Amino acid sequence: MPRPDQHLDAIAKLGLWNGIRLRYYAGMRNALLCVILLFLGVIVGIGTVQREAPPGFPPVEAIREMVRARQPHLFLDELADAMAAPELDGHDLRALLRRLDEIGAGATSAELSTIEGIRGVMLRRYGHPGRAFEVLWRAFRGSEDRDEREALLEQLFQAARASRQEQEFLRVTSDTALLLEFGQPLNDYRALCAALPPPLSGKWRGKLLLIWAILLVLPWFIAEWRVYGWRQRFPGPAERQGPFFAFMRSPLGAAPSIVTALLVLAFNLPAALGFEGAVGPAVGHLVVAFLLSWLPLHRLDREVRGTTWGFLAHARTVVGMALVNAVLLVVPIGAALILRAMTANLPLWPITWPLGVGLGFPALCGALLLIYPMFVPWFLWLRRLPTAQRPAWAAGFDVPLYRWNLDGSKIYNALSFGYLTPFQAIAISSPLLDEFPGPTAAAILEHEKGHLAQGHLFVYFLLLLAGSMVGGVYAVVWPLEVQRLLMTGPGFWQVAGFLLALVALMAAFRRIAWEHEGEADATAAAAVGREEYVQALTELTIANYLPERVRAGEEPQGIHPPLQERKRRLRAADGECFTSAQPPAPVTLIALWRSRLAVDWKGGQAEAEHLCALDYHLESSDLESRWRELAARHADFGAECLVRRDGRGLEVLACAQKACARQADPALPADRICLLCSAGQREALGDPRVTWAGTSTGCRLLMP
């Protein structure tokens, strides 16, 4: 049991930590708010400045003369030539639409038809062929110039093909007078609209289905090959823990499914096989291919971790967690789809009012971010725990708790979600809730409660909102590119830019998350005791088969630091930590102490104590340095030590020698080992004032 003074120390440290944490949280929050306000100012400033016509744009009279040329199909290109530009940008098009409105106020009927034709050409060129068909048809009917009508007829045909309104084109051009007026050109257009693509033969259909089936099972084959190679590389259970963690979380697992889904779209297999749309079948392919590729990983999980859950339960959890973690993808794509629907009903909206899109995108992202956590219980199949059904150790938590049913998974986990206080909650996996001791589970929940109490999730919200502001800046700077993106899909550089921004945002997210994990650890340690919380973290890591440290040559993965790093951070506030990067094997320590106990039995206690003192041979002259030397020697034996900050003592927090004594078969006398080892340490220190006291996992050596 912790001493009363330990609780007083914990309360004092909690007060100090709260002050530091509040300053850090306020600084991070305020910094992100400043970034958001900065981006907001940039968006509004650019959107306001670009209301005026760009330098060098032709005046109204010059535009009027170009309209009177009666060539709406060439108008945009001629205007670009007049401005010595390869093509008109969004700023130019916005100025043009305003000029056309000014001209239309006092234009003749012939000029109005030409203006209408110019608008129709713009709609067709920039992603609104369906609306362009209507506008061009009105312009065609209102025009009386033979050459202009012929040009508009061609534009009408192209709009019909682009919007799949071939039958409507055939209907409106079936008038005999039109057939007589335009003759062969119109007959050619009608023939192309009436022509149907030849149906695929059974042989070609079978070949395409075979190609699709190969693409569908290819991710499964790659996964089987990767699992086989991993088994060959790590055949023994002793060396599998860290590599298994890295292997299961490798992005290479999902890459084949994504690549084959993209190939299905690239080869246009759904359309070739008669599907109306291509996106739905491609998404279905992605889901099925991913689930098939998870079959070998599920078998490996059962083999390595000894789990008993079925494949469907495993797949449901994987997909649910993928949906939870996909917020960085789902939110911006969802906002873009909403903007696309708005643009489809407000043609050329990103061009005519880029400020609306520039502000609308981050506003929609913010709204979707706030709504997204409400779906977490559905994604993960969570069940809310009423107060009456909570365990006794969780009765005092004032946060809504959910039971996360993961029976047979050996996943001992808890997660907090919700950006705003009214929607925040904590989910606890059923193995953690049912199998862990109450104090250990309560310590883990204190960590999650710390995330909520310190506003970490709101900081993540501000970070993601700041990232969405970059999209708002893009919308006001390049409105024409946004128009094309929304109506015709993203281009290569837009996808590349989005992925680059996503990687940068994820890097910033992980960097902040590591700091937040340390803060939540400190809060939990202050609530339940430092070593009690460290022990809970250790048990959680071992139970989840997670690596305790990052192996040499590997990059740390995920948003949680490795266990050794978390221990070091918790203990660093009280002193200097010493741990071993490569602890000796337990069998070595057992053999060492069997030989020492033999000396104790044959040569006597004094001889055995002197032998232990030789193992802790210290060379420094001052006591403070000797504490460090002794801690380093313990770390060489695999212990975790802490030299007190005041230089007046050493805590062996986790003694590997004591642990190995209990693991030996037959067990070694741990009390005798501690007696000999403590006497050897005091002799090595050379100061009779040093006192020794044993603990359940180690010992303390202190100066009075």
Image: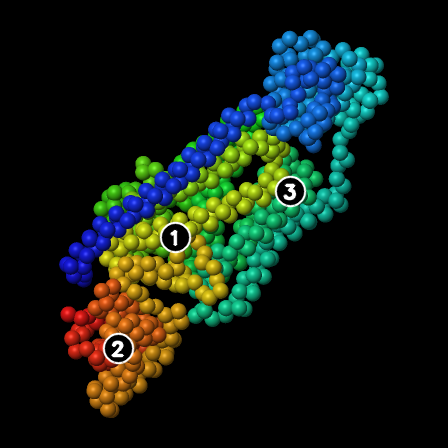
Q: Return the residue at label 3.
A: 265
Q: Amino acid at mark 3?
A: Leu
The residues bearing labels 1 and 3 have C-alpha atoms spaced at a distance of 38 Å
The residues bearing labels 2 and 1 have C-alpha atoms spaced at a distance of 39 Å
Q: Return the residue at label 1.
A: 514
Q: Residues within 10 Å of mark 2 (few under 14, many from 20)?
A: few
In the rendered image, residue 608, in percent from the top left (x then y), is placed at: 24, 86
Q: Are marks 3 and 2 in contact (CB under 8 Å)?
A: no
Residue at the location (61% across, 35% down)?
489
On-image quarter of the C terminus: bottom left
Q: Amino acid at mark 2?
A: Ser
Residue at the location (81% across, 24% down)?
188
Q: Are marks 1 and 3 in contact (CB under 8 Å)?
A: no
Of marks 1 and 3, the one in the foreground: 1
State whether residue 306 appears in this view. no
User: In terms of sequence position, does the residue under pointer 3 or pointer 2 come before the other?
Assistant: 3
Q: Is residue 455 found left or right of 704 in the rendered image? A: right
Residue at the location (48% across, 33% down)?
42
Residue at the location (24% across, 65% down)?
644
Q: Return the residue at label 2.
A: 621
Does residue 550 sit above or below 209 in this rendering? below
In the rendered image, residue 593, in percent from the top left (x then y), is placed at: 30, 81
On-image quarter of the N terminus: bottom left
State whether residue 274 appears in this view. yes
Q: Secondary structure at mark 2?
A: loop
Residue 638 falls in image quadrant? bottom left
Q: Amino acid at mark 1?
A: Trp
